[in-house]
Image: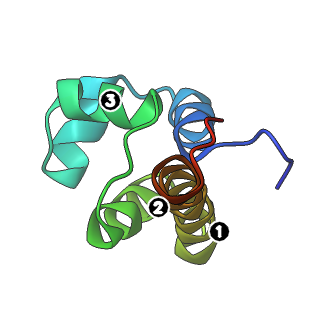
Amino acid sequence: MTMNETLGNRIKQLRNAKGLTLAKLGEQVGSGASYLSQVESGAIPSPSMVVNLATALDAEPADLLKLACAEKLEQLAARVKQRYLGKKR
């Protein structure tokens, strides 16, 4: 995992490698293409959706979950800094 690798970027890489459209991947994981586009753009899905995506994309669920957790932690840290320390990222 590189410093600027995000869950969304990784999902997009895996999806493209399998030749799947957002719509096709959505069918496989029970979600809409619009939502998956949001995930690829930075929205953090639920842990169960991360596992579903990993399964559909033949990826290791733990690897994708680590990316999701790291991003969520970064978001939380930024909010804490802004709220309690008055610092913006």
**Mark 1 → mark 2, Cα distance in angstroms:** 9 Å
Q: Is residue 66 left or right of residue 48?
A: right
Quadrant of residue 5 in the image? top right
Circle 1 or circle 2, nearest the eye: 1
Q: Is residue 47 above or below residue 45?
A: below
Q: What amino acid type should be assigned to the residue bearing mark 2?
A: Ala
| Residue at which label 2 appears | 54
Dot 2 or dot 3, earlier in sequence? 3
Q: Are marks 1 and 2 in contact (CB under 8 Å)?
A: yes
Residue drawn 52% across the image and 46% down it: 82
| Residue occupying the point 38% across, 56% down | 53
Secondary structure under the numbered disc 3 in the rendered image = helix
| Residue on which disc 1 sits | 63
Query: Element type at marker 1?
Result: helix
Q: Which residue is mark 3?
A: 38
Q: What number is the disc on residue 11?
A: none
